[in-house]
Amino acid sequence: MIVVTGATGNVGRPLVQALAGAGEKVTATSRGVSDADLPDGVRARPADLTDAGSLRPVLDGAEALFLQNGGADAHLLDPGQILDAARDGGVRRVVLLSSQGVTTRPESAFHGGVARAIEDAVRRSGLEWVILRPGGFDSNAYAWAESVRALRTVAAPFGDVGLPTVDPDDIAEVAAATLREDGHCGQVYELTGPALTTPRQRAGALAEALGEPVRFAEQTRDEARAQLLRFMPGPVAETTLAILGEPTPAERRISPDIERILGRAPRTFTDWAHRHIAAFR
């Protein structure tokens, strides 16, 4: 059995679908997961990553664990207790969804502190492990959905700065492969899209998928900071702005790992836009 944490998220949802489609026995867990969220045959078990005790009955009898790093709640996790519960339940392999920023932003309290500590706990766990480090997600464009629906406008800073954002479905397919296949243990994979794209170009891809013009309005750094502070702490907002506005060469690098593992090129942002355009209509 494979346990997928964050099972209703951008990566967890397609991962559950991929594993179920491959005939694996899957338990899907998140705080609010229910059978209605899941493919037939997948077991829903609500649990909270910040409460390792709630995971123990979920992990009992599992052989592999997909562990997402907690996102905004990562600082509340006790990764040692989670991994102890996994070992006690019979888990042999853990695949961790981490972040590229662990190496590109070591000065960040989140990336170099919290996320690095979770990676270190996985390495010390005694389990077979794989670490996935994606950069920015294509699905971050959902932040524009309301303004595109209402005003056919995308507002974003750094309109002509390109990053190789990645499709969450590609992350999920890599996670499925590393959970199911031998030969990946002890590896750290960096996951990016196939090309640099700018916010202005991504707005254009949404327009093409809609079949209607979408105006791009470039925000100032201060305007973008004010927007980010509505849902993230100040230090995280500053790191996000730095990545978006002054990416390092490593953050602009296009990784070969998705193609190496899946035997095909990563999907483009245009692919993502066409598959999810209903959210922008």
Image (cartoon, grey):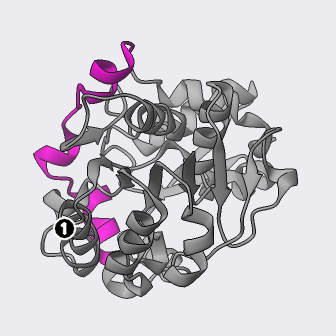
Quarter of the picture containing the C terminus is: top right
Residue found at the very far top of the displayed protein: 263
Most foreground residue, 168 or 205: 168
Q: Amino acid at mark 1?
A: Asp
Most foreground residue, 5 or 73: 5
Question: What is the x, y in percent for residue 51?
Answer: 53, 84
Q: Which residues are magenta?
A: 238-265
Local crowd size for mark 1, using a 10 Å CA cut-off: few (<14), some (14–19), many (≥20): few
- Note whether 189 is above or below 110 in the view shown: above
Question: What is the x, y in percent for residue 225?
Answer: 42, 77
At 52% across and 75% down in the image, what residue appears? 49
- Note whether 79 is above or below 265 in the view shown: below
Q: Is residue 9 magenta?
A: no
**Quarter occupied by residue 32:** bottom right
At 65% across and 62% down in the image, what residue appears? 29
Most foreground residue, 12 or 66: 66
At 51% across and 41% down in the image, what residue appears? 168
* Relative horizontal placement of residue 115, taking residue 15 as reference (left or right): left
Secondary structure at numbered mark 1: helix
At 44% across and 58% down in the image, what residue appears? 90
Question: What is the x, y in percent for residue 4?
Answer: 56, 53
Quarter of the picture containing the N terminus is: top right
Most foreground residue, 66 or 219: 66
Q: Is residue 262 magenta?
A: yes
Question: What is the x, y in percent for residue 36?
Answer: 88, 52
Answer whether residue 230 is visible to the viewer in this image. Answer: no
Name the residue tied to disc 1.
120
Residue found at the very far right of the displayed protein: 36
